[in-house]
Amino acid sequence: MSKKETANEAWEVAKTIFWALVIALVLRVFLLQPYTIPSASMEPNLYEGDYIVVTKWSYGYSRHSAPLSPPLFEGRILGQAPERGDVIVFKTPLDNRTDLIKRLVGLPGDRIQIRDSELWLNGVKVPRAAVPRTGKEDPRSDGADLFRETLPGGRSYVIQDYGPGQPLDDTEVFVVPEGHYFMMGDNRDNSADSRVPAAAGGVGFLPDENLVGRARVVLISWKPGASILKPWTWLNLNLDRVVKPLG
């Protein structure tokens, strides 16, 4: 093969790699992005090791839609308001870089309070009913009580609670400012969320600009100790959580 042919082949390979990267970037910014759950704050609906898919178009686009959150513009483009109960990936206001995932429970103007570990919304207690254990629950939720919480409008989901006397079981009344949201983890006693100020390591009121996308489905769920970086553990799956839609 001549030097010219070698150079042409190298150029073609470089172009292929370039366009593959461009397509991957476009998909990541505008359509879908995968995430791995890093903590227990969303148990019993999301566990560490769950590999989820997030739709980026759900709430429009902000600077946080792109990798590294470049300061290209302020606010949102093609913005759509989220709904109470959505499970959302967002950038924490503490550094505007770290990805977190919580459930949206408070919209602008809402008054949120926790009394005796129960959620109150605009002066009305949000209904919750005990969920009997079946014995098939993930052992990582052992010791917790399970409840089905139902928001206004009928949106419901299961939360877990480790009993009375926890630090965040009783709070002040939070009034959600315009252009912000109130986020909570489903693992109510193990989540530094909007009940905790951003300066203290929590989320505080979440700016609309910080929304990244809506979590739609658990694609793959690994058992503890497994990792996408460890191919020999890939078959150590929670089969009942594979391709599981998120409510």
Image: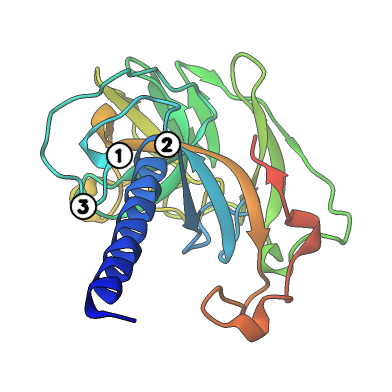
Q: Nearer the viewer, mark 2 or mark 1?
A: 1
Which residue occupies 14% across, 44% down?
A: 70
Residue labelled with disc 3: 68
Disc assigned to residue 9? none
**Dots 2, 1 in contact, CB < 8 A:** yes
Q: Is residue 225 left or right of residue 86?
A: right
Residue type, mark 2 in image: Gly
Residue 109, image x and y in percent?
33, 14
Whether residue 40 is visible to the viewer of this picture, yes or no, is yes
Residue type, mark 1 in image: Ser
Residue labelled with disc 1: 65
Residue 40, image x and y in percent?
53, 61
Q: Is residue 46 left or right of residue 109?
A: right
Disc assigned to residue 213? 2
Which residue occupies 23% across, 47% down?
A: 198
Dot 3 surroundings within 10 Å: few (below 14), some, or many (20 or more)? Answer: few
Check the image and report above or below for 78 versus 132.
above
Quick one: which residue is furthest to the front in this view?
Answer: 2
Image quarter for residue 139? Answer: bottom right
Residue 203, image x and y in percent?
30, 45
> What's the CA distance linking mark 3 and mark 1?
9 Å
Describe the element under mark 3 as helix, strand or loop: loop
Give the quarter of the figure containing the C terminus.
Answer: top right
Describe the element under mark 2 as helix, strand or loop: strand
**Dots 3, 1 in contact, CB < 8 A:** no
Residue 156, image x and y in percent?
67, 29
Decide which of tag 2 and tag 1 comes sooner along the chain: 1
**Foreground pick, 114 / 68:** 68
